[in-house]
Amino acid sequence: SDIDNYNDIDGLASLINCLDLIITIQNSTAHLSAALGKKTWIMLLKNARWHWTLTDMTKSLWYPSAKLFRQDKFSDWKSVVKSINMNLDKFQLEYKSK
């Protein structure tokens, strides 16, 4: 509660660095997390901003540590959440095996 994610970028970066995985929407947290090289999963609208659509459906041109989860249909987040859940199961298995 002491971190102001809007006005305290250093505090947000510190919080991000404490995490193993960041799941977020297309916002400043996504950019900062991915720029820090943290494993970042980004939930995108079907008509996401241009910088998320320059490559294939799951990779970011700008951030190698980012994985993109895009809506199949406008306003439908079910497929995005389902895909994240499946990937999260895999992530947890990989994390536990380390």
Image (cartoon, rainbow, N blue to C red):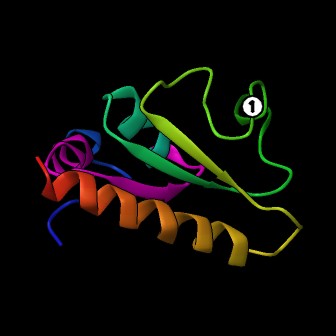
> Would residue 22 be counted in the magenta stretch?
yes
List x then y, in percent, for residue 92: 27, 62
Question: Can residue 84 be seen?
Answer: yes
Q: Position of residue 93 (x, y in %)?
A: 26, 60
In this picture, residue 12 sits left or right of residue 25: left
- Residue at 31% across, 37% down: 38
Q: Quadrant of the N terminus?
A: bottom left
Q: Nearer the viewer, residue 59 or 95?
A: 95
* 27 or 97, nearer to the observer: 97
Marks counted in the figure total 1
Q: Is residue 40 left or right of residue 17?
A: right
Is any part of residue 5 visible from this angle? Answer: no
Numbered disc 1: secondary structure = loop
Q: Residue at x 24, y 41 (%)?
A: 13
- Relative height, residue 31 to residue 86 (above, below): above
Magenta residues span 11-28
Q: Is residue 7 left or right of residue 48?
A: left
Q: Mark 1 points at which residue?
A: 56
